[in-house]
Image: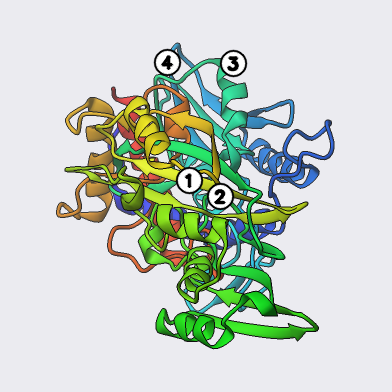
Amino acid sequence: MEIKNSQISELVTSYKDEMISALTTLVSYNSVLDESNPAYPFGEENAKCLNKALSMAQEFGLKTCNLDNYIGYGEIGSGEELIGVIGHLDIVPCGEGWATDPLKAEIIGDKIFGRGTSDDKGPVVAALYAFKIIQDLKIPLNKRLRLIMGSNEETGSKCLDHYVEKMGHVDYGFTPDANFPGTFGEKGMVSAKFECANTKLVDIKGGVAGNVVCNHVTVSVKKADLNYNQFIANLISYDIKYTVVDNDDLYVFDIYGVAAHASTPHLGKNAINYAIVALHEAGFEDEFVAEYSKLIGVTYDGSLLNCDFSDEFGELTFNNGVISMNDGVVCGTIDIRFPVTNTVEVVEAALIKGFVSNSIKLEIKGLVEPLFFEVESKLVKSLVSAYQNVTNDFDAKPSTMGGGTYAKGINNTIAFGGCFENDEDVHMHDANEFIKIENLLAQCTIYVRAIMNLLEL
């Protein structure tokens, strides 16, 4: 059955307004992690968003299933083999600095702005309509096709663990949560936290999530402990913006950096790091500040800890995304992404050895091995071929990345789309996240062709 790309594109375009409306609806749910109610493992808003997406799938004729408000899926087709398209409906916190309401998708020019438009609600909508178009075209289905939609990708992927435990793995799959023309490797990950009780800081608080470069931190110090003029001069030298409130015997500083995804910390400026180093270089005598400056400083590659590993596919990245102070104890998060040819044992050992401090105590919270597929594997080749077939772009090459996706949690799956190489930054995990309307439609066309290719395997 020969189907031309023009046929697919024509159908996709006919659904343009519906797709924008569906995305607008999903963006309206503030689906961030909330574990306060046992009936909703990741929060009531997450459950509502999941059920709304499942109702959309049901309207398109998919057989749907909600697995305990963890994750759900819609399915068409028949056969022993299963193709999975696995996206997520949860989001990172909206944070500050938005020019629009992040929970009200707003079209400005050729872009739709809102939290989740590119990560990952937009790609989920593109995949959902790909399933609809496959039915419209009456493409014979010799395998089952399942659109799997999770609610906890940003904060641990327990939703996918639950799915795999209940339903097993897929025979072929992709997650629309990275870049075209495909991602054949994902860096390994180490998550950790640190604590320090030896500090003269009165308070420190900043960051929205461990996997986001902190763009705003508030620091309170006693006036008597601070060389104010030197501290301000240091911030200015680093091109860091700030405001200050004179509060009796305290200075309260709001210090601003630039947010970015933790997998690309070089694209941001970590407000936590610059605030602490500026204090240290101003002569602020404090064990925590001194040790932090020595071990982390303003680096993002782990070099001060002697764990700056690299290979032909990339370099280690290091991010402290969140910091707070409780009962005089400073607590912070660490997010490390390490090269695909390393192992967790090697990186963990180097981190522990490098993080030698009498003041700061390190605790490893999670270890994830890298993901790696051969570029010539039939899964990678089939998906890259779909991208090339639709776009006629044979220059872009599949790559590895520092971000972690569902592909690490389920067999026979890689990340595929939905961002396009050399496209402008869509501000994932940052204020003013958006998706271009033309890219939303292009994703859908590519996903139809990708599923058709996987049906032929």
Q: Residue 137, position in %: x, y? A: 43, 39
Task: Measure how far apart labels 4 and 3 are at the Cα level.
Answer: 18 Å
* Residue 68 visible in the displayed image: yes
Give the residue type that dot 4 points to. Glu
Give the residue type that dot 3 points to. Glu
- Within 10 Å of the Cα at label 4, are there few (<14), some (14-19), or many (20+) other Cα atoms? some
Q: Pick the residue in front: 24 or 223.
A: 223
The secondary element bearing badge 3 is classed as helix
Task: Measure how far apart labels 4 and 2 are at the Cα level.
Answer: 37 Å
Image quadrant in which you'd find residue 104:
bottom right
The residue pinned by badge 4 equals 81
Q: 181 left or right of 269?
A: left
Image quadrant in which you'd find residue 115:
bottom right
Q: Identify which residue is drawn at 62% across, 34% down.
A: 61
Task: Measure how far apart labels 3 and 1 are at the Cα level.
Answer: 26 Å
Which tag is nearer the camera, tag 3 or tag 1?
Answer: 1
Task: Measure how far apart labels 2 and 3 are at the Cα level.
Answer: 26 Å
Q: Residue 272, position in %: x, y? A: 54, 64
The residue pinned by badge 1 equals 335
Q: Identify which residue is drawn at 31% across, 42% down.
A: 307
**In the image, residue 1 above or below residue 291:** above
Whether residues under marks 2 and 1 lie with C-beta atoms below 8 angstroms apart, the answer is yes
The residue pinned by badge 3 equals 165
Whether residues under marks 4 and 2 lie with C-beta atoms below 8 angstroms apart, the answer is no
The secondary element bearing badge 1 is classed as strand
- Of mark 4 and mark 2, the one earlier in the sequence is 4
Q: Residue 47, position in %: x, y? A: 75, 40
Indicate which disc residue 210 carries: 2
Task: Measure how far apart labels 2 and 1 are at the Cα level.
Answer: 6 Å
Which tag is nearer the camera, tag 2 or tag 3?
Answer: 2
